[in-house]
Image (cartoon, helix red, strand yellow):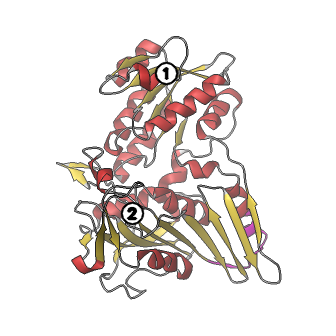
Amino acid sequence: MSTATPLPIVLAGARGHGRWHLANIRSLQDQGLVRLAGICELSPLGPAELDAFAGELPEQSADFGALLDSTGARAAVICTPIQTHTELALTAAARGVHLLLEKPPAATYADYTRMADGVREAGVACQIGFQSFGSHAVPAIRELVRTGAIGTVQGFGAAGAWVRDDAYYRRAPWAGRRRIGDTDVVDGVLTNPLAHAVATALALAGDGTAEEVAAIETQLFRANDIEADDTSCLRITTTGGVPVTVAVTLCAERADEPYVIVHGDRGRITFWYKQDRVLVQRAGRGPEEVVHGRTDLLRNLVDHLAHGTALLVPPHRTGAFMRVVEAVRTAPEPTALPADAWYTEPATAATGRRRIVRGIDALVAAGADTLTLFSELGAPWAQPSEVSTP
């Protein structure tokens, strides 16, 4: 299809993280590539929320399907609660509307496959919103590994130490939930806020497909009074026998940039994926650091529709990640950490009141550095692994 005229887009979910998408759509609209045709929200956005859009304001409705019909949208960005992704994606696909679908693509593996099958059968393009896959560092690292820059790969480690206060879990009815009634949500640290750590490690370890996962070990914990996990680790064993270990928390002593380490027998590569920054350390040479560029995923979708450019994150590249979501979903309920494992920090100018797990920053870093789980690192509160074999 041609995009000689701007591609009409509907945004479903324009508040919360949706504000980022709203700003991104505005940027591409200013370049003449897209046009915001409609916004789907339960309550309409006010003028102050849309003051960045000059001229005619987009149509608004709480009915996604009706809005796609009335606006003639050719593409949609879906940034709604996790448990709504599949049905909204299929609603768009049934109308021939192409998609940028926020991560995680679904709350269950069954819903993921239903969504992926639906968009494929409808013949629409679907991009999953793992922004780190747009980093030019990803192909650069894969090339370094392919050419043996760090020797034989021994494994992949990922670490994420973030800070989230009490208000984070009050921001939406689904926040911090594993399920609402009979509906799966799976809003844990591994599957949503630090999902990029998991997915990026899997993207570097292979092609990100479901078939590459042989087994998954999970250790899920929570310091906060929530259903889901906020401090967890897991180890994925690929079909090639390579371990991918991820250690993450939302209860860090100090917030830090998440990263992925590629371990080789003659060096290592560290990738701070939010910064597109890569550090290569190898035998016989000094450290080399490079900051790479990044391709925006919505721009990539527009280029795909206009010029046939390959999509960066089609659904099949997130199959391995969805195996992880399913393993977390079906694992035993996260273990509440004992009271002496965490403490409460009063509200500050930067954050509200929050819980901090003692020593968790060092533990998370050690997990990525040594490819070991919390229990193997000697955390007194850690339990033996729950193993899932897809």
User: Is 177 drawn above or below residue 338 in the view shown?
Assistant: above
Q: Is residue 68 magenta?
A: no
Which residue range is magenta in the image? 143-154
User: Is 292 drawn above or below residue 270 in the view shown?
Assistant: above
User: x, y percentage for residue 148?
Assistant: 77, 74
Residue highlighted by disc 2: 250
Kindly identify the amino acid type of the residue bearing the numbered disc 1: Asp
User: x, y percentage for residue 4?
Assistant: 69, 17
Q: Which residue: 51% across, 35% down? A: 21
Depth-wise, is mark 1 or mark 2 nearer the camera?
1
User: x, y percentage for residue 25?
Assistant: 56, 29
User: Is 347 drawn above or below residue 75 in the view shown?
Assistant: below
Instruction: Let me know if residue 99 appears in the view.
Output: no
For this view, does 352 lie left or right of residue 11? Answer: left
Residue highlighted by disc 1: 51
Q: Which residue: 56% across, 59% down? A: 200
Q: Quadrant of the N terminus?
A: top right
Classify residue 346 by image quadrant: bottom left
Q: Nearer the viewer, residue 220 or 364?
A: 364
Q: How many marks?
A: 2
User: x, y percentage for residue 331?
Assistant: 29, 67
Q: Is residue 150 magenta?
A: yes
Q: Residues within 10 Å of mark 1 (few under 14, many from 20)?
A: few
Give the structural element (helix, strand or loop) at label 1: loop
Compute the Cα span from label 1 to label 2.
33 Å
Q: Which residue: 26% across, 64% down? A: 224
Kindly identify the amino acid type of the residue bearing the numbered disc 2: Leu
Q: Which residue: 70% across, 79% down? A: 152
Give the structural element (helix, strand or loop) at label 2: loop
For this view, does 364 lie left or right of residue 260? Answer: left
Q: Quadrant of the C terminus?
A: bottom left
